[in-house]
Image (cartoon, helix red, strand yellow):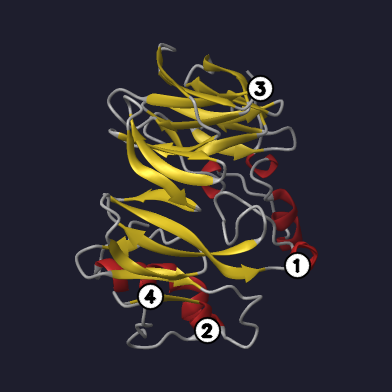
């Protein structure tokens, strides 16, 4: 089993050299879980060490996805392919897939796998649950699956009955509700955005494949609008009890707006709710996410 030193992990060596010393304690560079596994990144890749610095999971992965070891499993990427390994580094799901989505925290984990553009859902033991006869897959929960056809998204159940029609340009779970996106009559200059480093992305989505702008809001399973379609980016923090949500405005459309008006908490009608007391620049850099979360869900609810 290979042993490494703390200063060889998590890209911190250069930083510590600039400060004139190397870390000698593993707690300085990683957090250990309840079984003593600490995530590390070395020059060779990603893995896990124990408290003595031995690589209990070799640093052979291109990426390992958080949260780690839910029910003892990790999703990772190796040699450009995705799979799942356990605490003994056994490939529970072989590393042959183009994409993987899984709810590993559930009592009976299910896994969605993409191979050559085709999706299927299996259980963690590899037993087939269903083949998905759709162009795209986004995610699932205990009862529902978000899938797409011809770049429009809808919802099916595990018997593949259509629960919500395929009319949305974006759809994802937000608690018991859904963040939905629909296009508006605005098209962006693709070349200009790509020069600014803005590309089409299914997670950080601002526009469709044709660079047509999408507006995002919150709907329920019956397509009732719970939060208006006013955000330029998917709404992922929403409180159905008070109707508040965190929304984002595109900086390239609003070059004159300051940071406070590009990302903020809004009431149920989409109006900005100011912080009280207001944030200083230092507080914004350190506590912005916490203050937003607590303005939506209440004081003391921030999980980190």
Q: Residues within 10 Å of mark 1 (few under 14, many from 20)?
A: few
Q: CA separation, marks 2 and 4?
A: 17 Å
Which circle's residue, 4 or 1, is located before the other in the chain? 1
Q: CA separation, marks 1 and 3?
A: 42 Å
Q: CA separation, marks 2 and 3?
A: 44 Å
- Quarter of the picture holding the N terminus: top right
Q: Secondary structure at mark 2?
A: helix
Query: Which quadrant would residue 107 be assigned to in this image?
Result: top left
| x and y percentages locating residue 246 in the rendered image | 40, 69
The image shows a total of numbered marks equal to: 4
> Is 35 above or below relative to 198?
above
Which circle's residue, 1 or 2, is located before the other in the chain? 1
Which circle's residue, 2 or 3, is located before the other in the chain? 3
Which circle's residue, 3 or 4, is located before the other in the chain? 3
For label 4, the residue is 265
Residue under the image location 52 percent in, 17 percent down: 93
Q: Which mark is residue 2?
A: 3
For label 1, the residue is 196
Q: CA separation, marks 4 and 1?
A: 26 Å
Q: CA separation, marks 3 and 4?
A: 48 Å
Q: Residues within 10 Å of mark 3 (few under 14, many from 20)?
A: few
Q: Is residue 149 visible?
A: yes
Residue under the image location 28 percent in, 33 percent down: 143
């Amino acid at each position: 089993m290979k042993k490494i030193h703390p200063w060889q992990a998590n890209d911190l060596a250069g930083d510590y050299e600039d400060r004139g010393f190397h870390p000698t304690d593993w707690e300085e560079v990683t957090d250990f879980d309840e079984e003593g596994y600490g995530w590390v990144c070395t020059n060779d890749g990603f893995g896990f060490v124990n408290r003595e610095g031995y690589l209990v999971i070799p640093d052979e992965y291109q990426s390992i996805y958080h949260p780690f070891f839910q029910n003892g499993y990790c999703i990772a990427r190796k040699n450009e392919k995705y799979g799942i390994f356990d605490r003994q580094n056994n490939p529970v799901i072989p590393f042959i897939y183009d994409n993987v989505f899984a709810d590993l925290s559930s009592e009976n984990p299910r896994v969605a796998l993409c191979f050559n553009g085709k999706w299927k859902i299996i259980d963690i033991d590899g037993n087939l649950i269903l083949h998905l006869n759709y162009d795209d897959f986004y995610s699932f929960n205990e009862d529902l699956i978000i899938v797409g056809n011809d770049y429009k998204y809808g919802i099916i159940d595990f018997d593949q009955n259509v629960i919500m029609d395929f009319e949305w340009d974006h759809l994802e779970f937000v608690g018991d509700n859904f963040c939905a996106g629909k296009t508006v009559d605005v098209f962006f200059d693709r070349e200009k955005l790509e020069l600014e480093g803005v590309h089409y992305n299914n997670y950080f989505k601002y526009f469709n494949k044709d660079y047509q702008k999408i507006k995002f809001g919150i709907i329920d399973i019956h397509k009732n609008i719970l939060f208006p379609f006013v955000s330029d980016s998917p709404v992922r923090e929403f409180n159905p009890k008070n109707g508040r949500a965190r929304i984002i405005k595109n900086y390239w459309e609003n070059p004159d707006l300051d940071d406070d008006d590009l990302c903020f908490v809004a009431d149920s009608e989409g109006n900005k709710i100011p912080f009280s007391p207001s944030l200083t620049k230092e507080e914004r850099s350190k506590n912005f996410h916490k203050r937003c979360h607590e303005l939506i869900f209440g004081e003391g609810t921030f999980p980190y």
